[in-house]
Image: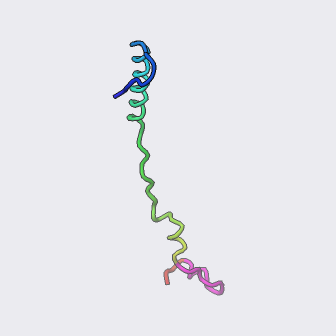
Amino acid sequence: MIKVVKGNPTPEELAAALAVVQARAAMLAMAPSPAPQVTDEWSAPARVARRRVPHPGPRAWGRTYWPA
């Protein structure tokens, strides 16, 4: 409900103001709502750093691939 608090608008002025309010409400109703951000677990940095990094030394490259 719209109520004129101060002044005495003409019917044309009131109709113009109401048209602007309705157009704004319609635009906001049609705008897409922001979707919740879904984080992919496979790309999470915490997933990569879950295991300890192997100590350097002979055959360290093999321990970087095979799970312990």
Could you tell me which residue is drawn at 54 percent across and 77 percent down? Answer: 65
Magenta span has 13? no
Coloring basis for residues: rainbow
Name, please, the residue furthest toward the right.
57
Image point (50%, 65%), residue name? 44
Left or right? Give the position of 1 relative to 31. Answer: left
- Residue 55 appears in which quarter of the rendering? bottom right
Along the viewing direction, whichever of 40 and 18 lies nearer the viewer:
18
State which quadrant residue 59 falls in. Answer: bottom right
Q: Left or right of 26: which side holds 45?
A: right
Q: Is residue 58 magenta?
A: yes
Does 21 appear above or below 38?
A: above
The residue lying at 65 percent from left, 84 percent from top is: 56
Q: Residue furthest front?
A: 6
Residue 5 place in picture, x, y as percent: 42, 25
Quadrant of the image occupied by residue 20: top left
Give the image location of residue 61, x and y in percent.
Answer: 60, 80
| Viewer-closest of 5 and 38 | 5
Identify whether 46 is placed above or below 24: below
Question: Where the N terminus falls, by quadrant?
Answer: top left
Q: Residue at x 38, y 35 (%)?
A: 29
Given residues 17 and 65, the one toward you in this image is: 17
Please tell me whether residue 27 is drawn above or below residue 45 in the rendered image.
Answer: above
Whole-percent x and y of residue 11? Answer: 39, 13
Q: Which residues are magenta?
A: 51-64
